[in-house]
Image (cartoon, grey):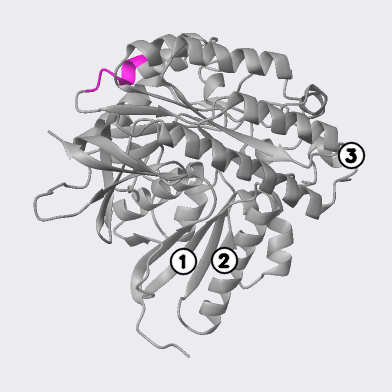
Amino acid sequence: MRTKTLKKNKVNMVTMGCSKNLFDSELIMGQLKANKFDVEHESLSEDSEIVIINTCGFIGDAKEESINQILHFVEAKKEGLVSKVYVTGCLSQRYREDLERDIPEVDAYFGTRELPRLLKTLKADYKHELIGERFISTPTHYAYLKIAEGCDRPCSFCAIPLMRGKHVSTPIEQLVKNTTDLVAKGTKEIILIAQDLTYYGLDIYKKRALADLITELSKIDGLDWIRLHYAYPSGFPEDVLDVMRDNPKVCNYLDIPLQHASTKILTAMRRGITKEKTTELVKKIRKEVPNVAIRTTLIAGYPGETEEDFQEMYDWVEEMRFDRLGIFAYSHEEDTHAYNSEDDVPEEVKKERTERIMELQAGISFDLNQEKIGNTYKVMFDRIEGDYFIGRTEFDSPDVDNEVLIKKDKDTYLRIGDFANVKITGAEHFDLYGDLVD
């Protein structure tokens, strides 16, 4: 039974998965706002007539979370707490027929490139003049900027090409315009995202043009930080390192998923690179950009991964001492190349291996953070939480990396989005503590 009056044309946009999905949600919300819809992102008010769930279909856990979210809102619909439930994104792109059969209570399912159809279903006009315009759900001082869609890489474990299609770069002039508009609204940091940043430009400029894009973006007055996420190691464009080192607006930060350290496993993964070449690239990056912070992602339990293969990766992580690191347990995804192989590493072994790597990385992170005590860094402040102002250095991305905490007191005044110099006075595994410096 309906417990409250639902607001007509109010939309609750719910995003599952990564920042690339968040970007897509913001595009949807931007179009709906232009059509006079009342839009909130992950609203807590529970008075929305319409819910749109932007799903993730990357790995097993993410798919399960998306399905649970769909079922939650289907139940809310039965109880009269919402009127319409729509599902879009990667999961419905990949499994639409299954979802329509198994969860028919959803009013409609849409794929990753069906924004016009979604808008038409909501009786909204697709406004071509608003291409690139978004309703920013992050704090206004930082925003994600998707520079390409899709992926041409043949990685054996990855279903992204099935859900997102082939790589398509957005032209530099469009990205400059979009960023200029963001900066005019208060954005100081943009985080470049794509399935593969380093492939950028090959389809439209016939060359890797990431360095050219960064250079043009850095000319925008009022933009302070440019951050790079999701760079592929094979064919890495080394001119990007020159820009990172020489251009003060480019953060000394690189997110470069490396996936494994065993050449045997990398070959099976179809990564187009060996352990030796990977190590050489990491050392090259650190040589060319001495203060760079490198974030990477690994996979444990890929088919055929022996204890010796895992130990090789463990020892390599210990040797390389990455600033940031995450690790996934391998997920056996249908229609991928690896699905033809037996998923022969037991789930409990995958879990144990991921935990061993993360325990190792926690120790590395603690040691690296201890080395920061006494140093002073430029910090951007993202939020106030409890008794602390919480911010980040250029070496840290939102939500996934270290945070810098400043104790609130009567003499401390900071606004969200402000920069300030902070001297680090204490450090834990993933947090830094400091004092403001004049």
Q: Residue at x 81, y 31 (%)?
A: 309
Three-letter code for the amino acid on which mark 2 is drawn: Gln
Quadrant housing residue 112: top right
Quadrant of the drawing holding the C terminus: top left
Comparing marks 3 and 2, which lies closer to the viewer? 3
**Do tag 3 and tag 2 residues touch (Cβ < 8 Å)?**
no
Magenta segment includes 217: yes
For mark 1, what is the residue? 51
- Say which residue appears at 86% left-offset and 36% top-offset: 306
Of residues 212 and 233, which is closer to you in this image?
233
SS class, disc 3: loop
Give x and y (percent) for residue 86. 53, 63
Q: Which mark is residue 243?
A: none
User: Dot 2 lies on which element?
Assistant: helix
Q: Is residue 60 above or below residue 289?
A: below
Residue highlighted by disc 2: 69
The CA span between labels 1 and 3 is: 39 Å
Mark closer to the chain start, 2 or 1: 1
Is residue 116 found inside the magenta-colored segment of the image?
Answer: no
- Provide residue 32's location: percent of width, then percent of height: 36, 54
- For label 3, the crowd category at 10 Å Cα-Cα, with few meaning under 14, some 14 to 19 and many 20 or more, is few
Give the mark nearest the N terminus, 3 or 2.
2
Inter-mark Cα distance, 2 to 1: 11 Å
Q: Is residue 336 above or below residue 32?
A: above
Front disc: 1 or 3: 3
Q: CA distance from mark 3 to mark 2?
A: 31 Å
Q: Secondary structure at mark 1?
A: strand
Magenta region: 215-220
- Amino acid under disc 1: Val
Q: Identify the residue position indicated by label 3 in the image.
A: 341
Nearer to us of marks 2 and 1 is 2
